[in-house]
Amino acid sequence: MESLDKDPKYTDLNALFIGDKAENGDLYKELLNKLVDEHLGWRKNYITQDKNMISPQEQDSTEFKGTVERMRNVLDELSQRIRTESVPWHSAGRYWGHMNSETLMPSLLAYNYAMLWNGNNVAYESSPATSQMEEEVGHEFASMMGYKNGWGHIVADGSLANLEGLWYARNIKSLPLAMKEVTPELVKGLDEWQLLNMPTKKIMDLVSKSGNKMDDLKAKSARSGKNLQKLGKWLVPQTKHYSWMKAADIIGIGLDQVVPVPVDNNFRMDIDALESTINRLAADHTPILGVVGVAGTTEEGAVDEIDKIVELRNKMAKQGIYFYIHVDAAYGGYLRTIFLDKDNNFVPYDKLPELHKKYGVFTEEKQYIKPEVYKAYKAFDEVESITIDPHKMGYVPYAAGGIVIQDVRMRDVISYFATYVFEKGADIPALLGAYILEGSKAGATAASVWAAHHVLPLNASGYGKLQGASVEGS
């Protein structure tokens, strides 16, 4: 299918939006009518021997007509209020910011269509098609970030994704303490400081070695409420999104554990300040639960030097200090596509102009991407988890956030299995709801994100071109 082409010969972004003056309005109506007709046709042809539930006589009744008239009046009022009371930002090309920007027409159409089926992606049997789409989107997130064995899923927004990131960090960090109780042979000879500074990969390897003890380990982990104050500090840049305070509150580590790190003149986390903060805490024998780097701060659009945060962790690891890293790329996550060729290879910096020229990423032959930003995005595959929001630079309608994890095994540390919904031992996407924070969630969102990813490939030929237009426009 052309829509699945990783290297489309032509991508005209102007074909993918309704347009400031509804230039593509007829195209939107044509495609929407086609999808609606297909849905209505399916209803008419499903078990054709069934009799109609709504008779012509009822449709002709006074009560029926009165109800229809009331519905028309309500929708007229709805239209009037939204047209007159909404801020007309994207309706006439007068607003070039992003929080309420224009969204991709294929995403709108996919959302419109999938709403008719009312899929609930918490359980596979209630949403087979859109659950599969969300599974595919999760793997696409992972591939975009360079994860070889990663996994991801859609959430309502970046705040929930950040909450899940802290949830992962809290539970993983506490597992070695649980091993001391449940499987002491796996951590024999290690003291508490060593247990609290164990690398994530080592922890997951030990969990794999524990055999069928996973449930016992989780029961003794931070999930139980034990050891929360022992896990250490959660370091965030001063440019942090306010959702991190809410996450620390809800997850139970407490606001006192959140430590702001100063930023430099470019509004990026000051790496020297980060190092001195870690050394000061370590001198008091206070562990570091994790460090958050931001790619696209809400107010400034700054990109923290993720590569230097990773380098600092590698340096600290030689001193027996390890911390989880989460990248809050709610805004900037999709920018990583600007560095990827059609095979998802992260191209060398000196080859970027050639790649961008090939696909028309920019209209002018300028190197907009600074070397330090390039290095930051290149290091994404070395962190444990990343927040990415399709409803921001993915140009997808709300509510569509996302989170991706480096190691698919990590999802086991936060899983819950509702017996009335999930058959334990089944595979994703049947068990999607067991590994996420939310319960019921719209299948239409998954369809919307999936459609966007398949119209615009997640590399420089597709989404990269959209990111380039956004950067150049700004």
Image (spheres, grey):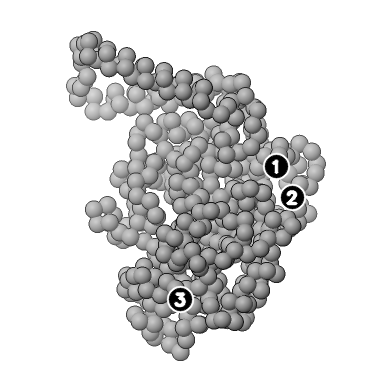
Instruction: Verify CB contact (< 8 Å) between mark 2 and mark 1.
Output: no
**Mark 2–mark 1 distance (CA, rounded to whole Å):** 9 Å
Instruction: Verify CB contact (< 8 Å) between mark 2 and mark 3.
Output: no
Reply above or below: 298 against 261. Answer: above
Residue 360 at x, y percent in the picture = 72, 38
Task: Give me the residue at 56% from left, 75% from top.
Answer: 322
Q: Earlier in the sequence, mark 2 or mark 1?
A: 2
Reply above or below: 126 against 329. Answer: above
Task: Give me the residue at 43% from left, 30% from top.
Answer: 112
Query: Which residue occupies the foreground of this view, 27 or 6?
Result: 27
Q: Which residue is mark 3?
A: 230
**Mark 1–mark 3 distance (CA, rounded to whole Å):** 43 Å
Crowd tier of the residue under label 2, counting other residues whose Cα lies within 10 Å: few below 14, some 14–19, many 20 or above:
some
Q: Residue furthest right?
A: 365
* Residue 369 disc label: 2
Q: Amino acid at mark 1?
A: Val
Q: Amino acid at mark 2?
A: Ile
Query: Which residue occupies the foreground of this view, 150 or 287?
Result: 287
Q: Amino acid at mark 3?
A: Lys
Task: Give me the residue at 66% from left, 74% from top.
Answer: 276
Give the secondary structure at mark 1: helix
Q: Work out which quarter of the rendered image holds the C terminus and state it.
A: top right
